[in-house]
Image (spheres, rainbow, N blue to C red):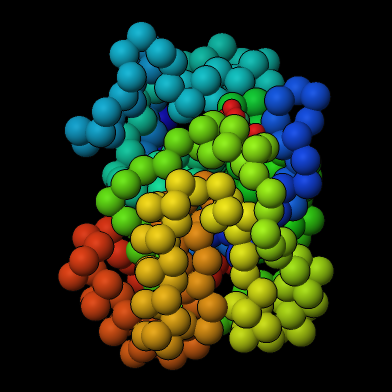
Amino acid sequence: MKRMTQQAPAKVNLALDILGRRPDGYHDMRMVMQAVSLCDTVTAEETEEGFALHTGGDFIPAGKKTLEQRAAEAFFTAISRPMPGLSVTLEKRTPAYAGLGGGSADVAALLRILRDRYCPDLPGTELERIGFTVGSDMPFCVRGGTALAEGRGERLTPLPPLPRCHVVLCKPAFSVSTPDLFERIDGVRLRRRPDTLGLLGALEAGDLAGVARRMYNVFEDALPPRRAGEIGEIRNSLIQYGALGASMSGTGPTVFGLFRDASAARHACSALRETYRETFLAQGLEPVE
Ligand code: C5P
């Protein structure tokens, strides 16, 4: 196998709503997901034996199989083939633990590499199913583009693409634990819910301002007050710099804003970067498949 490479685009949640906690401990979600051009690069190569993951210095917990290895094993089980030795390299640009699905995007890119090399006829829905065995947001990361994600995140409905725009993503310096925030939200009375139906209508109409105006993420209500304050400040800054709307992505803490105007987006990005080192400029992406 020669070296094979795939891009691993980050995602943002244009809307994130939680419908309730399920008997299995997970939550039923309704999310409008959008892939963006901020991405890692994943390279894989066949080796003599074993599974090796190279992350350029990022921490890999010892003694625990990585999601990449678990997904590769699930892939070869699904296609009934013994797993060869694999060396996988991640070139990271998307911040981790940021609400941008960066880790899942890397695993999804690896699955696309394995599919292209070992089973090109494998349907996309089967690759999504394999991904789902290692994480709830994997099916979307495999597919990309713009989609409504329901259930735990595995029920995907393709949506019309986000109208052309510029996305400024700004990650404050703290991290948020996804399981902790899910735990917290069970005890919180939600003050506001996203207008998901209205947002879907705005996507259908190609109405960027209508999409941006309706963006909302219920996890903002579950943040500790000090954190919520900082998220609110970033959102206000994005709006002041000209964003049509801004919201937190996933379980945070990244806040993103949608801009029609490229130069306003570039200005917002460089101004916010003075305070927040991890600030990026991106565009919406169409599906990978
Ligand atoms: O599926 P994944 O491993 O990415 O989920 C991480 C954690 O997030 C789960 O252990 C669970 O606590 C929470 N989660 C949830 N409901 C979902 C997705 C994730 O409660 N739909």
Q: Is residue 132 left or right of residue 247?
A: right
Query: How many marks do you count on the picture?
Result: 0
Is residue 22 visible in this depiction of the protein?
yes
Looking at the rendered image, the quarter that the N terminus falls into is top left
Observer-nearest of 126 and 132? 132
Q: Residue at x 40, y 52 (%)?
A: 227
In the rendered view, tell whether residue 36 sits above or below residue 2. below
Q: Residue at x 34, y 90 (%)?
A: 263
In the rendered view, tell whether residue 165 sits above or below residue 93. below
Observer-nearest of 141 and 82? 141
Looking at the rendered image, the quarter that the C terminus falls into is bottom right
Q: Residue at x 45, y 46 (%)?
A: 224
Q: Position of residue 97 (x, y in %)?
A: 40, 42
Rendered image quadrant of residue 76: top right
In the rendered view, tell whether residue 70 sits above or below residue 247. above
Q: Position of residue 189 (x, y in %)?
A: 69, 49
Q: Position of residue 134 (x, y in %)?
A: 59, 27
Is residue 154 visible in this depiction of the protein?
no
Q: Residue at x 32, y 80 (%)?
A: 268
Observer-nearest of 267 and 102? 267
In the rendered view, tell whether residue 37 sits above or below residue 68. below
Q: Position of residue 33 (x, y in %)?
A: 63, 58
Ligand 1 is found in the corner quadrant, namely top right
